[in-house]
Amino acid sequence: MSAGEAVAGPGADVPRLMALAERAARAAGALVHGQRPDRLEVDTKSSPTDVVTQMDTAAEDLLREVLAAARPGDGLFGEEGGRRPGRSGLTWVVDPIDGTVNYLYGLPAYAISVAVVRGDPAVPGAWESIAGCVHAPALGETWTAGRGEGAFLDGRRLRMAEPPQLPGALIGTGFGYRAARRRHQAGVVAQVLPQVRDIRRIGCAALDLCLLASGRLDAYYERGLNPWDMAAGQLVVTEAGGRVRGLGRTPPSEAMVVAGRDPLVDRLAQLLADLDAAGPD
Ligand code: LIP
């Protein structure tokens, strides 16, 4: 049994899964970045500002094609196309364009996020990422990670440095699409802002997590993330020496994701719990 299989379970050749995740993400990146049409067709989902374009759908179709051809027995769980069951115990969790609003506006902070997980990605705490890739074609940067294999930016290994204390920390976050939740989140960030160095709202959770792992943020929190937003990025963080958690004793989930290195990640999580950042709207 290889080191990767010892960590990730039987049948999981982690380096090969990392390479497949990167190959698929780069193929989708070439499509959305290289063939971006002058005019994007825009539909909406959970709210008038929660958008999806024809390139999101085309990219997910391409990801499904590449991954099914390489590993037909694996499941797949995508933002746009829903869930295809598998029989291998592994499921590919994909976001074809994370940061769709940035993509729509021609801003470069968007990424293709591809991860393979063991367990059920629809159940918080019931799954773990085995390998993943976050590919940012407009930035020309690609992050990869494998359980027990490390985290890499363009092939260079990442190790997160000792974090600053909260008042000196640059904190990434994001906001939901529904007005009631945004109102609550605005109240939370208004309390966080005076207690930290500053806030950055990148608009792409997968990139937030990878920027954290790369030392360009000191910590990150967001409520409302789906498995496809975070499955690859959270592995980049943990393999770079960080932690990804929820509030209290809960796992990271739609309710809350807090990421960073100890002890800052726990100090931020406590502040967010004190501010009731995970509820009610
Ligand atoms: C985005 C997330 C981001 C969040 C945005 C949006 P999408 O995902 O990556 O962190 O703040 O509101 O949900 O919708 O672009 O795939």
Image (spheres, rainbow, N blue to C red):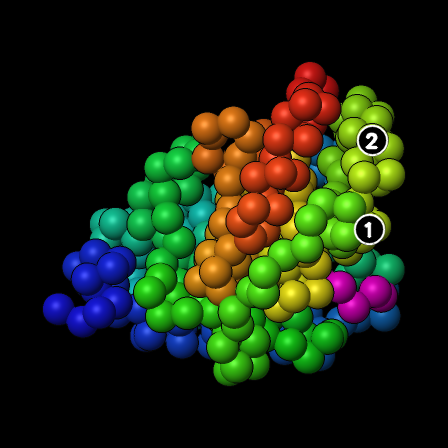
**Left or right, residue 111 beside residue 42:** left
* Magenta-colored span: 106-110
Q: Main secondary structure of the magenta part?
A: loop
Q: Cβ–Cβ below 8 Å for labels 2 and 1?
A: no
Question: Viewer-proximal residue, 75 or 162?
Answer: 162
**Left or right, residue 10 beside residue 245:** left
Residue 267, percent from left and from top: 62, 38
Q: The residue under label 2 is which amino acid type?
A: Gln
Question: Viewer-proximal residue, 52 or 99?
Answer: 99
Question: Quick check: can you spot residue 85?
Answer: no
Residue 197, labelled with which disc? Answer: 1
Above or below residue 47? Residue 11 is below
**Left or right, residue 187 beside residue 267:** right
Residue highlighted by disc 2: 191
Report the quarter where the C terminus lies.
Answer: top right
Residue 102, percent from left and from top: 80, 58
Q: Is residue 180 magenta?
A: no
Q: Residue at x 70, y 65 (%)?
A: 216
Residue 278, percent from left and from top: 64, 26
Above or below residue 104? Residue 119 is above
Compare marks 2 and 1 and give the one earlier in the sequence: 2
Label 2: few (<14), some (14–19) or many (≥20) C-alpha neighbours in 10 Å: some
Question: Quick check: can you spot residue 219?
Answer: yes
Q: The residue under label 1 is which amino acid type?
A: Arg
Residue with the most extreme top position? 280
